Image (cartoon, rainbow, N blue to C red):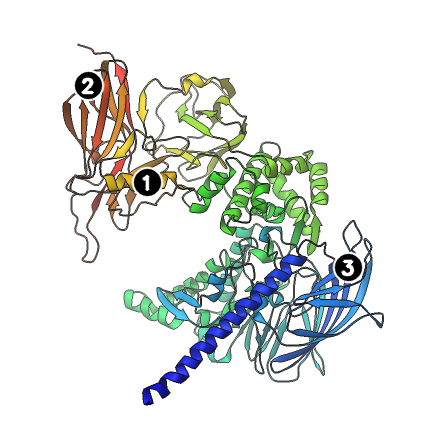
Amino acid sequence: MISILFFLPGSIGILYSWHDCQNQENRRELYRETYLHYQPEAKARAIQNDITYRSNGKYMSVTSKLSVQNQNKDTLSRVILYLNPTLHVTKIQENTLKVDYSRENQVIVLHKKLAPAERITLDIDYHGKIDDAICYLDFPEEEISNETRIRQNKIFRFGKEYSFLTENYTLLHPECIWYPVCVPPANIAFPYAHETNFTHFTLNVDHKKEGEVLSQGISKTTDKGVVFVNEQALTGISLCIGKYEKKEMQLGNILLELYYFPKHKFMFDSYQITDKQLQIQITQIKNRIQSNFGRYYPFKKIMFIESPTSYTSYERKWKGGSEYIQPEIVFFPERLFTLAYSPLNVAKKVARKTNPSEDQESLNTQVEKNTLRSFEMPLLGGTYSLSPMFYDYMSFISSDKYPGVNTLLNDLIYQQDRKIMLINNEFTEEYIAVTEYLKNRCLQDGFREENLSTKTLREMIRLKAQYLKAYLSTRISLDELKQFCNDMASRLQFSEIKLEQFCEEFTDRNLLDLQSVLNHLYQEKGLPSFVVKDLQAAKIAGEENKYQIHYKVWNTAQTPGIISLGAHDMEGNSLIERNDIIPPKTCNEIYLETMQEPSQLYIQTHLSQNIPSFYYIEYENGIHQNADKKAIGIFHTDSSSFLSRDIIVDNDSDKFYFTDSTEQKRVLLSSKSKQKKYTLVCDPPQWIETITHRSFGNPIRSTYCKLADHGKRNAVWTTDISQEGTYEIFFYHQDITVSFPPVSSTFPGAKLHYAVQYAGAKKEITIEADLEAEGWISLGIFDLPKGKVQVILNDKGGIVEKDNSKQGIEAKRQLIIADAVKWVQVKRTN
């Protein structure tokens, strides 16, 4: 009986929690359906919103004086507004006259026509509390319901709250729609087709209690509370009320304000460096962040506001950040808990313990500087990225015809100061999914595809932006492109820019029809497929300090593509960066000259069927070879120079297989799957297929690999010799090395055990893998009759030399590589 009494309260609590979750899921689904129902309707824009806010515990009372304009070309048959569904509207008037309206959950429908450019001003009174179920409806329920957070490999559950409205603390932001808007926070159906509304806000907060009242804009304290006036239009406004302590610093024309909970003062009082040193360090961080985003910070102040641990937001790929980042505001986690942060006093103790002989004062100063720099990385990417402040909150390019064009052009601008060669994510599932999708479809299809994941679509936009940058650079200079984009963003700050206007000005400035370029970018189906050959650099004989760079390329597909070539010197300085359009079914031979000796050559094939999309060659010991001929320019050639009479069986051929039936079945199932999966090399006990830039293949350079074992799992390459004769057999050798766990195909002592089998004969060959250069390695010369010939590689490996690694570090192990084999017919010489 006693156990039942203990059991009942717990059971009731579990049932109540389950019912609450189910109830929230049901409400979220209801709100999602409401959004989808009204999503297709043309929307007005909120031009001005003067908000008067009063709160009473968990409830608030608000008056909004909202100016709305129809900026569409056609008359609106009705005006749609959005407001949190549990906020009860008591009045909507225009010039003291009641406006006829109806309401469905978060949607308010004004039964009133609005002609193009017509503007009306509404007085709206409402009160109530916030229903968080309206937030983040573009995220799957699994992610919303998962309350687990991981910090330094430890799991925590703080609960999740998207807003706060209590007696002691308030945190409201645009996602919870706490004031009426014309454009919802997200496009539920197609996130990348979202719209943005820049509005001039004033906020009058009736608050006489203790605590800071924080919002965007210039604040002024009155006898009733605080008034915030914004000089520029914003995409949204936030309100935070609570007990905070404050620190501030002027960084040039930017005011930095830090608000933290009083009990957490210790986090910021441990700094011993002078105010001047602190200002220098933070100014350097500011400059690096601006350099990273390629723009100056557009606002006059930035507030870092500590928020409760349970306050939650999510990274939106289409936005480049999360709702933690608002115009002028960063809501950072309580005690920086969810960030990789170590308290300053702890960091100093660790530093003193590991460096006891160092001067303690200088050591403390260095720790403080390093701690400050550690705050920089989260602001450059991910959930706390400041990207929206530099892009979407600064200006927004809208288009009905080209969804996601704002994200596309933002990516283009963001990539301005980045080398084309180095923007690669080929080994991600998203990259491979994009190339598979675009083989017979286009970007426009991607925006209409409901089953396409947001991550894949985001990667598609990034790659299209990279391609667009390379294409435009063949027509105009990159400096000119950068100047135009930044001029446009600066001149039209804090406003929505119609794509038609952007394209018109672009055409006028650069004599390039950007509209037709975008149409091609969105509508063209298929991807180019390149064969790249003979990438090399050589001296030009008889001319001092003059070098020739040469390569051949064949686009075998029906779709045009772009090849980018880059050359760097020993210090990593760029010597050449050139982009060339390669038409369909075209073979080109390209010669370039440079006055400095290149140390590295890169080729980037951009958005193509080639995976990886880059090729490179290094000259660690300098260039000693002379050029065969002196030439410069692009020369057309034919495909004969790319074709080979040799017999080649690659690892993706149906003439390559594994003798282990279980292994072979698994590989066959993988190859027949909708999207073939490749695995990053680590320490696979079974054969796995991976992609490396050193592998053989076209357009996908892949290979199979596994850890060395007992020699019982064989890889087999088979061919039929149609003409008997003498053949030299080669295998393709490469170095794949992983630092941890320590595995490599070329550790000292690594061996490869091959066998060549034909006409009842079998010859075994052992290769010292660590002594061979990468590329085609001979297994020997054989007199082969007509018929079947097999090359067999077992997984035995060699005895890898041990080192004096510390205990706890795994021993080195050999990686067995199974890539390609070729048969070359040769003439016997006596």
Q: Earlier in the sequence, mark 2 or mark 1?
A: 1
* Foreground residue among 461 and 488: 461
Q: Secondary structure at mark 1?
A: strand
Dot 2 surroundings within 10 Å: few (below 14), some, or many (20 or more)?
A: some
Find residue 36 and report its horizontal and vertical position in percent. Answer: 63, 57
Q: Is residue 61 above or below residue 637?
A: below
Q: Indicate the quadrant containing the C terminus: top left, top right, bottom left or bottom right.
A: top left
Q: Amino acid under label 2?
A: Phe
Other residues around mark 1 within 10 Å, as few (<14) / some (14–19) / many (≥20): many
Q: Which mark is residue 312?
A: none
Q: Seen in the image, is 198 located left or right of residue 525?
A: right
Horizontal side of residue 353 vs 483, given as left or right: left
Residue 694 picture quarter:
top left
Residue under label 1: 689
User: Mark 3 or mark 2: which comes first in sequence?
Assistant: 3
For mark 3, give the secondary structure.
loop
Residue at numbered disc 3 = 78
* Image quarter hosting the N terminus: bottom left
Compared with 496, 143 (above or below) is: below
Residue 185 in sight: no
Disc 3 and disc 2 in contact, CB within 8 angstroms = no
Q: Which mark, by number, is residue 782?
A: 2
Q: CA distance from mark 3 to mark 1?
A: 57 Å
Check the image and name the residue furthest to the bottom. Answer: 2
Query: Who comes first in sequence, dot 3 or dot 1?
Result: 3
Tag 2, which secondary structure? strand
Disc 3 crowd rating (10 Å Cα; few below 14, some 14-19, many 20+) is some
Q: How many marks?
A: 3
